[in-house]
Image: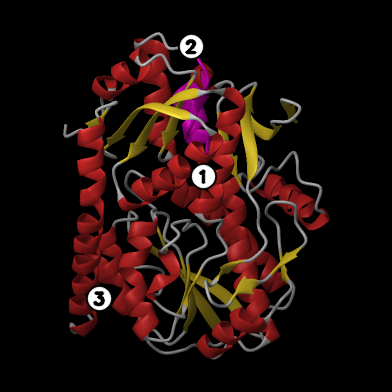
Amino acid sequence: MSIHSTGTNAGTTAARRAARPARRGWRKAVKSALAAIVASTTLLSVSACGLGGDSANSNAADGDTVYIAAIYPATGQYAEYGKLFKEGFDLAVDEVNADGGVGGKTLAIKYYDTQSDAKQDASIAPQIASDQSVIAVVGDYASPASSAASPTFQQAGLVHYGFNNSASTFTDTGDHVWTPQISQEQYQKANADVVAKKAKKISVVYIENDWGKQAYDFFKQEAEKNGTEIVYESSYLSDSTDLSPILIPARDAQPDAIVDIGYGPDGALVVNTLRDKLGYTGPFFGGQETSEFLENAGSNAEGTIITGSFSATGTKDSKAQAFVKAFNDRYGNNPGNFEVTAYQAIKDLAYAANKTSPTRDGIQQALQTVTDFPLYQGNGGTFKFNTETRRADNIDPILLIVKDGKFVQYDPDTDSASN
């Protein structure tokens, strides 16, 4: 296992940080080259590679049905997120069609399992772009994977709606790349601010990829503004199975709290290692709002605080409450952050299509001009896009805490949770 770790060694930290721009530039160049190569190749069916979706080989538009393509992890290490996304997608599509569809046509989804892997996203993108029945694309789970497909969709004039992509650079590819997701800059400001209410000195670990490093940079900037001292920092690889070598010094630095910036499975591994193997009993910030995290972390998750965008039990918005009821009636449990963002993505695009036309050009025009997209996240209401950044203008993060084995909305000012 390769682990990149720094403690309070300023020279090592500075050297590694100085090298980041070069590494990022190299990664960007590789991604651009890969996208260009893929886009220039002959389009072939890739169903033999496990990437084909429903009706994946259709290149002719169906007069009665229009499609949204979903690139998502149905299998692989991020399959839990794919399951949550699909629940939100399917519910939204059924509701849209029950309300008359889009422009009098039936809306449907073509699913493509990419395992949220950048190579697979880049490989499947040309096939989706050439399918004229597809009016927009949603996904993927991870921003690096999504970004590998964006150049192909941009070239085809096909909206890429990265509803889960919080990386602040996600929309940089071009004017057809959009996201309603709260940016990591906003998330990590909220994260650092709540940490500052609980701790004066902290240890931080974060996932070793572009998203993780960018998120940590934003967190660190805000922590420094707040006067929070980071006494230890370390990155780790997403396929790590034993994080003791970096968590022992994180504990031994005697922090007031330990922060993990990563995905749900990583958060469970971190907190379980800290609690069960290393005897750490202090505050923990990390993980994600999924049943997988809660099940894997068990009682160790109790009291964990994260940033989020939605609370099924805390929302006061009437349409969000209706969504919670419909979701619970269908699936037997409350939706979380990933289900609501997937659900809203389909609702957004259907709303766009009905404001203009159920076409690629119509979707793009609506995202540029509509100012009252129904908002289910945050405090509800409506939202619009900033046409320069192609990000939502007015969706703010909320805080969630694990209480009695469930994530509920958290108010740091009163230190209270709402069930």
| Residue on which the image places disc 2 | 281
Q: Residue at x 39, y 17 (%)?
A: 274
Q: Is residue 89 magenta?
A: no
* Residue type, numbered disc 2: Thr
Residue 417, x across and y down, in percent: 72, 28
State the mark number for residue 188.
1
Q: Is residue 234 left or right of residue 374?
A: left
What range of the chain is rendered magenta? 282-298
Q: Are marks 2 and 3 in contact (CB under 8 Å)?
A: no
| Residue on which the image places disc 3 | 45
How many marks the image carries: the answer is: 3
* Residue type, numbered disc 3: Ser
Q: CA distance from mark 2 to mark 1?
A: 24 Å
Residue 13, x across and y down, in percent: 25, 37
Quadrant (top left/top right/bottom left/bottom right) for the C terminus: top right
Task: Please say if 192 is above or below 72.
Answer: above
Residue 81, x across and y down, in percent: 46, 47
Which label lies toward us, 3 or 1?
Answer: 1
Residue 93, x across and y down, in percent: 62, 67
Task: Please say if 364 is above or below 18.
Answer: below
